[in-house]
Image: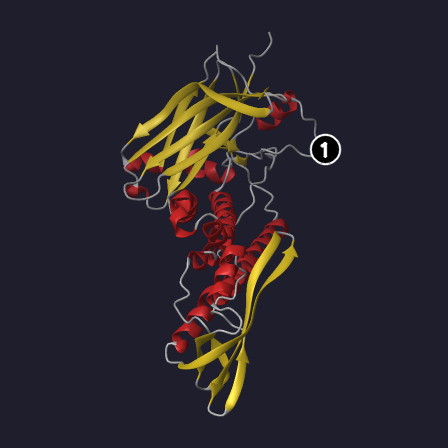
Amino acid sequence: MKAEQISNAHSNQGARGCLRVGTFLFGLFFLAAGLFAFWLIVINPLMRWNRAKSWSQADCKILSSKIQKRRDDDGIRYKAKIEYQYQVGRTKHQGDQIDFMGFSDSQKVARKFIKRWPAGSESICYFDPDNHADAVLIRSSPLSFWMLFPLPFIAIGSVVIYLAVAGKVNLNRRTPAPSGSIAASYHESGFDSANNADNNADNNADNDADNEDKKWSEPQRLAPKITKIQKLIFAGLIAVFWNGMVGAFFPAMIAGFGGWLALPIFIPFVLAGLGLIAYFFHTLLSLFNPKVEIAMSSGAVALGDSVDIAWKLTGKVNRIKKLKISIVGTESATYVRGTDTRTDAEEFSRLEVVSTDSSEKMEFGEQTITIPFDSMHTFKANNNEVAWSIEVDGDIPMWPDVSESFSFRVKPVPQA
């Protein structure tokens, strides 16, 4: 199997540097937001609660008890406002802190507080012996589902910063082969010399299929459809969004729908949030899987023609129990049914490139594959698309499997 060596590839260091800085700042933002939320929601309440276990008890009189209503972008929020007076020695103090969390409550919870501490009633409060002005009516543990909210922010920020600092964020740019290049095998130099396939056409180029085929009709080192970093960021954002919404509305929904008796209704929402967090960490672990590289003698092969495919895996390849690489053709169609727009996809071709449990064959190999003459070429329209890809699946026991996809093009049969 032969390929052309690229001796003067353009590295685009400036763009890579900007990408790393941007990625670092993105991760720093998430980490800072997560740490701030972690302090506000977890550390500070737990520290105050721990100190409050040794606070002194005092009799107090409820001076006023009412519900405060505030309207914001998320709707109407309700909060119980309870003012009480207590005496330490000969000094009288006033307080209005109910617990250590201090979050807005639902109208139903606020009414429960008002009913529990009506104006003019007598109760018990707890005050700090070192600061008599600091007191609460409730000093129970603040542990709640809320405390999971900052974790995805911290995890995403930490991982993205690590990847930026470690230089593992890269650009996949397509570089043309210069004239006068020499032939070399992929095993020796092909993965360093083959061109990276960029799936986005240049803004100044024509978007018709012929021009795309011409740009792909040379040795290619394919870029994955979606990188591991992109998967991680996507999983993290979805986990943060979902758990943030559930954490924000869960207490209010429980209170507004019959208290804890209604908990079974909302268990699926909580379980879905925990599942998204688990998926985020599953994706995080997949970053440490062996790295997969795929190269082709041509990134655009005609129907009925043969193409050379080479694969290279680096890292702890011996962890993979079985590796399977396939060429897959998929047809998708988008249509309107009533008021819904749906897209159906169907696999019409699957060609096996390799299936092996040998670590030696996994590390590097090459195979020649013929695209069926009676199949369909790459095509894209508004509502229909035919796409071809190389699918890599590696089974790793007790660990996230290797699962990556690389796109290439199939051309129509050349006209005579």
Estimate the x, y position of residue 117 in percent, counting from the top left: 48, 69
Q: Nearer the viewer, residue 166 or 24?
A: 24
Is residue 22 depicted above or below 351 in this figure?
below
Q: Residue furthest top?
A: 416
Estimate the x, y position of residue 366 in percent, counting from the top left: 39, 29
Q: What residue sits 47% from the left and 51% below the top? A: 250
Residue 160, visible in the rendered structure: no
Callout 1 amino acid: Asn
Q: Nearer the viewer, residue 219 or 329?
A: 329
Quarter holding residue 322: top left
Quarter of the rendering occupied by the N terminus: top left
Q: Residue furthest front?
A: 120
Is residue 41 depicted above or below 194 in this figure?
below
Q: Residues within 10 Å of mark 1 (few under 14, many from 20)?
A: few
Q: What residue sits 39% from the left and 45% below the top? A: 267
Quarter of the rendering occupied by the C terminus: top right
Is residue 400 depicted above or below 41 in this figure?
above
Give the number of marks: 1
Q: Circle 1 is placed at which residue position?
A: 204
Estimate the x, y position of residue 361 in percent, counting from the top left: 31, 34
Residue 210, visible in the rendered structure: yes
Quarter holding residue 317: top left
